[in-house]
Image (tube, grey):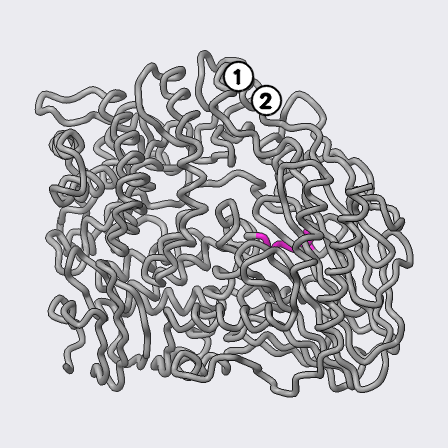
Amino acid sequence: MKSVFTKALITMAVFSALATAANAAPDSTPHPSPLLGKERESTMWIDKYDVVWTTPSVDARGSMPLGNGEVTVNAWVEADHGLRFLIGRSDSFSEIGRVLKAGQIRVALSPNPFASETFSQHLHLRDGYIEITGDKVDLKLFLDPDRPVIYVEGHSATPVTATVEVEDWRLADRTVDDESAWTMQGAPRPLVESADHFSPPTPNNGVAGKNAVAWYHRNETSGVPDMLRQQGLIDDADKVHDPLLHRTFGGYVAGHDFQVVDGHTLANKPATSFTIAIACPCSQSTVADWTKTATTLLAEADAKAVFAKSLTWWHGYWDGSYIDITSAGDKDASLLTRGYMLQRYIQAGDSRGEYPVKFNGGTFTVGRDGKFDDNDYRRWGDPHWFQNVRHMYHPMMASGDFEMTDPFFRMYEKAVPLAKARSKRYEDVDGVFFPETMTVWGTYAGKDYGWDRGGHPGLGATTPWWGKTRNQGPELVALMLDRWDYTQDHTFLKHRLLPMATDVLTYFDNRYARDAGGHLVLDPTQSVETFWNDVVNDTPTVAALRDICTRLAALPKDAATTDQHDFFAKMLAACPEVPVAEATVDGKTVKVIAPAEKHETERHNVENPELYAVWPSRLYGVDKPGLQMARDTYAVRTNHLDVGWGYDGNVAAVLGMADEAARILDVKCQNSNKDYRWPATWGPNYDWLPDQNHGGNLLETAQLMLLQSDGHKILLFPAWPHAWDVHFRLHAAYNTTVEATLKDGKVTDLKVTPSERAKDVINYLGGG
């Protein structure tokens, strides 16, 4: 009796809040904002990059993205069916680990205003919301920046009836056997995902009442134990948090004066204004607890206050970092700026969830090959390829989005206990290494580890593509060092960076033999996916080790313990030299960086492993020794990689090759898929769309062209074409912000904060 009464109070509060919003007077201001000061004025130029469509879309390929960092929406309007939107989350895992959509909503109005010539779907980029207008009707779609709640507000000059339907394609249990189930594909059992549940429209069932519809997906089984058994780690199950079992997600849809039509549908009486709210939490809990969370979110909902809060968040985000290219010679400056800004918008919408951004589409995937009967599909499936996911996180440093790196770091930190157990069981050594294709609970992807172990004795991955790679741990530490360099956050250093660095280097200290000079001999290993066999001292791992050991050994005396300082110095002394070879450039024999000290001649993929020494490890670059050797290495590279996870643009920028970096940036910004309406639907390239590692590289290339941090040095315009005019605000190491304007080849305005850091700026274009 008590639970029913409490539920009734919550329901009353929900509809009281929504009633307040629904009865509010329509806002006639096109871009309403509580910010009227310099914060708003400094980013008003962003308005010209709003995305506006003047005709409805045909299907989800015409969708427009929106997100609050945790929950994402793909929204489109069909002339005959109204507003539709898919709901995504980074943590809505199925029983077999796939990242599912939370659901799909349709909002139809009668009479239908969307078949008129006055139609518009308008993304207000700076303000972070979508506005849809039709015949005398205006809809506003936005999200709470801090909570998993989506809002649809409607205003009409004449009364309209709004029908809200939950459209679901998971109405029955289904077996999945394609590559979107990469982790479990090939397992010796059917890969079954259960159906979603809809609550019947009765008032006191603990989930929904006569004014709301609820649906949810719940995992009563989990594939995690299967993975642990497969990989010889079942005895270490206590070191793993199973993120699949009992995970519950979906949505709870409510609206003032809306009544349940059936178990999937709500409708209101004709009205000139209405507000719909959809709470979509995700948790490992009972259905009752999930329901309580959803109804509490709605009980505390206040659409007007949330919209104002959302505007404040978005304006602060844009004010913190931006790039505005105003002229670009023979290139389209507006295309370049639009590409950069739309990708930053996508990053903001998808980077504050529990788990990292999926490189193969993030949570903005739609359908498969033009079909939309299964919106949960994604090529390359559910695990995180380290070499792909890193691309979204490197540019977050210069953007100042440090907290957005937490999901990436947190996933690997949580995997440390299992990684230690794996090192001990597989190789009888202490320390940690991380798989290239890692599940969110820390195992290899099952497909890569190998379900059929015939002919593969012992423990370890059977895949030749990345079974022996070990560059992931050092590269992870390098990114954590970047965050320390930029923020000088001693808590992060002490409690997160130093423990991870120690565990990663302990593995190398124990796993590999030394040569006569005391240097590590990395064998067995491979040079990423390119060279698999007969490899010794692969350059990606050697470069990453030299990078992190140099930086760790240089930490201030009070930043680490004496034992840690001694260990880092020892490991620096043990680092192998970066391998070099000879090549012919312009008819001359020169030294170049080699893919490894020793390797087979056959190439298995199109990556250039020797360039890892330039990016991401940045051992070579502008104002560093060996610059010409690194440029010659770039000149003779076998593969030219302008798109996707290819990082040629980053390398060219680090090496100060302005024309080459500019060419690649232009190519990146033109990589939009012609079959999709959203301009930043990159790819699919090597992966899936929208290709997020392509987008991350786009951001990184542009940033490195403008600004590079090298210790205390700030390199200004190290790879920027003199003929390109630009205004930007980016972050540098040691809590520094740099804002500059370049006009006609000269720096006309430069502001460095704090001001004492101005002495560390090296201006590569001159002009003051």
Rendering coords of residue 647 (x, y %)? 36, 54
Specify the quadrant that holds the N terminus.
Answer: top right
> Circle 1: is it few (<14), some (14-19), or many (20+) Cα within 10 Å?
some
- Write down the quadrant of residue 316 in the picture: bottom left
Specify the quadrant that holds the C terminus.
Answer: bottom left
* C-alpha gap between disc 2 and disc 1: 7 Å
The structure residue drawn at horizontal position 28% and vertical position 66%, both measured from the top left corner, is 705
> Considering depth in this image, is 390 or 255 the residue closer to the camera?
255
The structure residue drawn at horizontal position 32% and vertical position 48%, both measured from the top left corner, is 638
Q: Magenta: predominant secondary structure element?
A: loop
> Considering depth in this image, is 517 or 483 the residue closer to the camera?
483
Whether residue 196 appears in magenta in the rendering, the answer is no
- Write down the quadrant of residue 507 in the picture: top left
**Which label was assigned to residue 234?**
1
> Considering depth in this image, is 522 or 708 the residue closer to the camera?
708
Q: Amino acid at mark 2?
A: Pro
**Which label was assigned to residue 225?**
2
Query: Residue placed farthest to the left in the image?
Result: 517
The structure residue drawn at horizontal position 31% and vertical position 39%, both measured from the top left corner, is 495
Q: Amino acid at mark 1?
A: Ile
**Which label was assigned to residue 58?**
none
> Considering depth in this image, is 149 or 662 the residue closer to the camera?
149
- N-term-proximal mark, 2 vs 1: 2
The structure residue drawn at horizontal position 30% and vertical position 20%, both measured from the top left corner, is 430
Q: Are marks 2 and 1 in contact (CB under 8 Å)?
A: yes
- Classify 146 as above or below 566: below
Q: Is residue 606 left or right of residue 158?
A: left
- Classify 260 as above or below 536: below
Whether residue 364 appears in magenta in the rendering, the answer is yes
Q: Which span of residues is magenta-colored? A: 363-369
